[in-house]
Image: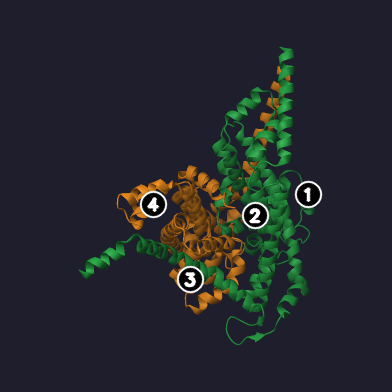
Chain colours: A green, B orange
């Protein structure tokens, strides 16, 4: 009898509901706390201490933060991010270009797509070795340049020469991620009804007009998203210098320096303060950009801003005019 | 008019193909040179230009040395274990979380969703400073399971994918199943989970690639030689082989082969996985 009622109780919707919510949420929430919010809280706490992973800690107030801004090799390393931002702009532009090329019919599309995309799948360490070899003195890049008649004496040391090594590193990141961006853009472009392209080209729209008035509006939101991701990604650039030069010879980005301070010098407090400063910077940048794009496009959720509506109307007018002209010619 | 159009479309085709061919060459050259170098003997490597063909493509000595010296067999085994466990667990935890957040209204739901959203803003490397301290105090360093827990814990992407997918699954499915006497657990496992297949594929592709290629946490949390994963096994070439790129390149090729095969077989799923995974925002 009692068992029965327990079973009934257990099976009642209300209890079952609570049970399902609790069991399904438990593991993800524990993991989220353990690997995001507890570390986050500790990071804030540690940033006020002078401490190592083990041993005594002393409270130092804002000293760590002051050090972040005062030590040139720390705050100055943020300027290295500018190289990666430059790379990011090149990467987005190239990806947009190649994706557009592939939207129009291309023979052997799958081969081009695969070869552009493949670098994305290679492990960071392997990419590091590939490019150490690629840039080494007298190795791949030097040989190719000499093949095209460049004098060996004029070729810089790609990874040592401080005037160029950050550009070399940012280029590896462009090499690795352009193909992935192509796939993203292509996916968004393909979701447009392909009849539109045909209709437009029958109406006499040239490639540029097709790009400007059909393709671009369809992928505006994904471009905006990628610009936002690009800026925060560049501020936190880590992999290329970490695996290729280990941050030596002026290639240390902010996180490479932070990583060294945390794990080699064991200055956990200072590293935590660095992390907090960059987090605040990234969040400010993200919010700033979101507001900016919202202002430009009126409404972040809609793909069409007032400016776009105006332009589309203009395009329609132009198309009508062209049709009229075409009619007159025939 | 028509003539002019033909010329311009011809010019466009030329630009299109030249640029695509050029880009493909740039993408592939760094890897292809590695392949050439991997088949060269020491003398050949020292005497020939890097762009020269090797004498034979049947010289596997470098691969053998790389495979043994870096203990890559062990690396592959460890990576395989980690892949299976982490992927299985994160598919279940991700889809269950998405199910609860999408289908139930309960106090704290909005907050939980926002906690996950905000977590995706925090760059992973920054958190590692203190995650290391937590891992250390829990005694999880130098255990394969500790490393797996780290990889499961820092997994926001697949949660996003599942959340998005649930938006498009009609609630009427759940309702009719419940009318038929199905429990909530039954609804999830019997009705909804099989329908999640596309989302599961997407999250397997994205998470699988990132786990296979992961080296930062592996380097930090698995320092014993027998615990090395495939990427950190490759990293052991940094010291002893300094400039012996014929060995290093064969190590690189060995790590690339599995993912290349995977990519060639599942090309379609990889592309759609990439495209779907990007829509988070």
State the separation of the CA atoms marked 1 and 3.
45 Å
Count residues near mark 4 (Cα–Cα under 10 Å), then give few for <14, some for 14-19, many for 20+. some
Which part of the image, by quadrant, shows the N terminus of chain A? Answer: bottom left
Give the structural element (helix, strand or loop) at label 4: helix
* Picture layout, residue B45 above or below residue B10: below
Residue B226 can be seen, yes or no? no
User: Answer yes or no: do the residues labelled 4 and 2 have beta carbons within 8 Å?
Assistant: no
State the separation of the CA atoms marked 4 and 1.
63 Å
- Coordinates of residue A205 in the picture (x, y in percent): 69, 26
Residue of label 1: A151
Residue of label 2: A229
Which of the marked residues, 1 or 2, is nearer the chain's N terminus?
1
Residue of label 4: B193
Residue of label 3: B225
User: For this rendering, which residue is in front, A118 or A9?
Assistant: A9
State the separation of the CA atoms marked 3 and 4.
39 Å
Q: Which chain's residue wears label 1?
A: A
Query: Which callout, 3 or 2, points to the residue nearer the camera?
Result: 2
State the separation of the CA atoms marked 3 and 2.
36 Å
Give the structural element (helix, strand or loop) at label 2: helix
User: For this rendering, which residue is in front, A287 or A252?
Assistant: A287
Query: Which callout, 4 or 1, points to the residue nearer the camera?
Result: 4
Displayed quadrant of residue A98:
top right
* Picture layout, residue B271 above or below residue A49: above
């Amino acid at each position: 009898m009692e068992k029965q009622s327990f079973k009934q109780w257990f099976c009642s919707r209300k209890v079952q509901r609570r049970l399902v919510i609790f069991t399904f949420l438990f593991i993800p929430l524990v993991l989220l706390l353990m690997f995001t919010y507890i570390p986050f809280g500790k990071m804030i706490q540690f940033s006020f201490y002078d401490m190592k992973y083990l041993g005594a800690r002393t409270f130092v107030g804002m000293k760590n933060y002051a050090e972040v801004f005062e030590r040139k090799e720390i705050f100055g390393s943020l300027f290295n991010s500018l190289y990666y931002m430059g790379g990011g702009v090149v990467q987005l532009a190239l990806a947009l270009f190649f994706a557009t090329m592939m939207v129009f019919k291309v023979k052997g599309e799958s081969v081009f797509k695969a070869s552009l995309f493949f670098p994305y799948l290679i492990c960071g360490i392997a990419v590091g070795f590939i490019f150490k070899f690629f840039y080494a003195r007298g190795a791949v890049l030097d040989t190719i340049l000499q093949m095209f008649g460049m004098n060996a004496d004029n070729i810089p040391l790609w990874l040592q020469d401080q005037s160029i090594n950050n550009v070399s590193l940012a280029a590896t990141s462009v090499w690795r991620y352009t193909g992935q961006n192509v796939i993203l853009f292509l996916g968004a472009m393909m979701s447009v009804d392909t009849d539109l392209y045909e209709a437009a080209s029958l109406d006499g729209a040239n490639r540029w007009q097709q790009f400007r008035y059909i393709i671009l509006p369809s992928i505006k939101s994904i471009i905006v998203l990628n610009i936002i991701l690009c800026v925060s990604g560049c501020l936190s650039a880590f992999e290329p210098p970490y695996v290729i030069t280990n941050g030596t010879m002026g290639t240390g980005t902010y996180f490479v320096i932070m990583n060294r301070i945390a794990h080699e010098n064991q200055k956990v407090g200072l590293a935590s303060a660095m992390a907090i400063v960059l987090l605040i910077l990234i969040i400010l940048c993200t919010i700033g950009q979101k507001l900016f794009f919202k202002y430009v496009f009126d409404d972040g959720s809609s793909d069409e801003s007032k400016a776009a509506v105006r332009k589309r109307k203009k395009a329609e007018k132009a198309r009508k005019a062209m049709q009229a002209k075409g009619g007159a010619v025939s | 008019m028509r003539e002019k159009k033909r010329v311009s479309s011809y010019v466009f085709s030329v630009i299109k193909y030249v640029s695509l061919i050029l880009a493909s060459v740039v993408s592939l050259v760094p890897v292809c040179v590695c392949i050439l170098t991997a088949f060269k003997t020491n003398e050949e490597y020292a005497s020939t230009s890097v762009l020269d063909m090797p004498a034979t493509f049947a010289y596997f000595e470098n691969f053998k040395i790389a495979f043994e010296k870096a203990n890559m067999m062990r690396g592959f085994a460890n990576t395989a274990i980690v892949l299976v466990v982490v992927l299985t667990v994160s598919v279940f935890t991700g889809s269950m979380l998405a199910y609860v957040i999408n289908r139930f209204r309960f106090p704290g739901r909005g907050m939980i969703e926002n906690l996950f959203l905000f977590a995706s803003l925090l760059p992973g490397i920054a958190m590692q400073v203190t995650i290391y301290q937590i891992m250390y105090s829990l005694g999880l360093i130098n255990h394969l399971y500790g490393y797996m827990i780290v990889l499961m814990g820092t997994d926001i992407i697949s949660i996003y994918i599942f959340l998005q997918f649930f938006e498009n699954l009609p609630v009427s499915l759940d309702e009719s199943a419940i009318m038929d006497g199905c429990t909530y657990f039954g609804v999830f496992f019997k009705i909804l989970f099989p329908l999640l297949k596309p989302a599961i594929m997407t999250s397997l592709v994205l998470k699988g690639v990132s786990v296979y290629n992961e080296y930062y946490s592996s380097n930090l949390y698995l320092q014993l030689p027998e615990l090395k994963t495939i990427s950190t096994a490759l990293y052991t070439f940094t010291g002893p082989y300094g400039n012996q790129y014929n060995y290093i390149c064969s190590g690189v090729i060995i790590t690339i082969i599995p993912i290349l095969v995977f990519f060639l077989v599942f090309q379609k799923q990889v592309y759609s996985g990439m495209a779907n995974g990007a829509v988070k925002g």
